[in-house]
Amino acid sequence: DAGVIQSPRHEVTEMGQEVTLRCKPISGHNSLFWYRQTMMRGLELLIYFNNNVPIDDSGMPEDRFSAKMPNASFSTLKIQPSEPRDSAVYFCASSGDSRYIYSNQPQHFGDGTRLSIL
Amino acid sequence: EDQVTQSPEALRLQEGESSSLNCSYTVSGLRGLFWYRQDPGKGPEFLFTLYSAGEEKEKERLKATLTKKESFLHITAPKPEDSATYLCAVQALDSGAGSYQLTFGKGTKLSVIP
């Protein structure tokens, strides 16, 4: 079975440019999560969706960050304009089975996008 | 606020030298505690879920245990391929219906030397 697919794997761009990260969750999963990982802060949840609807975006650092999930098989995280302090590894994860509402289904992660803002 | 603290930050073991990693947590009510393994350049890979104090789960050389305040990941006779960063995460009972939010610790980087 295909896991969570993220693209691109690496992105290097200059400060001020728009960056778009993409994620395809595991088919049948109804929750999708965007995380950021840095050495200093570890894994931080940015935003998560349930059934394509954003549930909690309190982890989004600033208005420069936005995320969308137009359908069950695709999500984007956009940074505009980008800044050097946004450099990190961004992970997408999916979980859940729509048959289980109150569930402890584990989250399954993609291999991330390593973002470098110069 | 949910908190997860892992110790030690890094651990070097000789091949075959058993040890344990610690995950201490503070959460209003625990729905589940998760262990993940992360290899360099990869995303976290799910290992175990523990739900209640006293529960244990095993997979090959790994055994995870849970008390009301902490979890241990015991590694028995480790091999070099067990080298990775091990992450612990908690999910709180008050996460709400349809919500699967996890709070992660910063991880323990394990190195197993041949």
Image (tube, coloured by chain):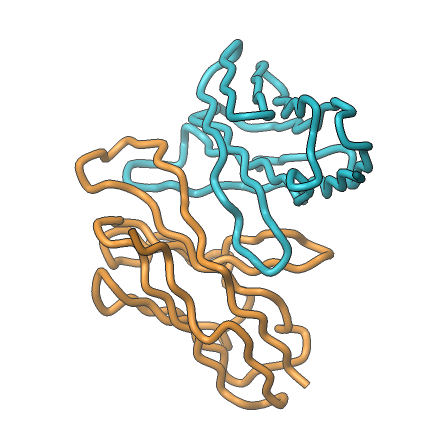
Q: How many marks?
A: 0
Residue drawn at the location 42% of the way across and 67% of the way down:
A6
Q: Position of residue B32 (x, y in %)?
A: 45, 27
The vertical placement of A97 against A116, above or below, is above
In this view of the protein, which residue sits in the foreground, A46 or A3?
Answer: A3
Instruction: Say which quarter of the image contains residue A49.
Output: bottom left
> Furthest-left residue in view?
A99
The vertical placement of A13 against B10, above or below, is below
Instruction: Say which quarter of the image contains residue B77.
Output: top right
Chain in cyan colour: B
The vertical placement of A104 against A108, above or below, is above
Instruction: Say which quarter of the image contains residue A7.
Output: bottom left
Q: Position of residue A72 (x, y in %)?
A: 22, 60
Residue drawn at the location 55% of the way across and 76% of the way down:
A10
Colour in which the image shows chain A = orange
Residue drawn at the location 71% of the way across and 40% of the way down:
B80
Question: Position of A36 compared to B15: left or right?
Answer: left
In this view of the protein, which residue sits in the foreground, B12 or A84?
Answer: B12
Q: Position of residue A1 (x, y in %)?
A: 29, 51
> Furthest-top residue in view?
B54
Q: Position of residue B82 (x, y in %)?
A: 65, 38
Residue drawn at the location 49% of the way across and 82% of the way down:
A19
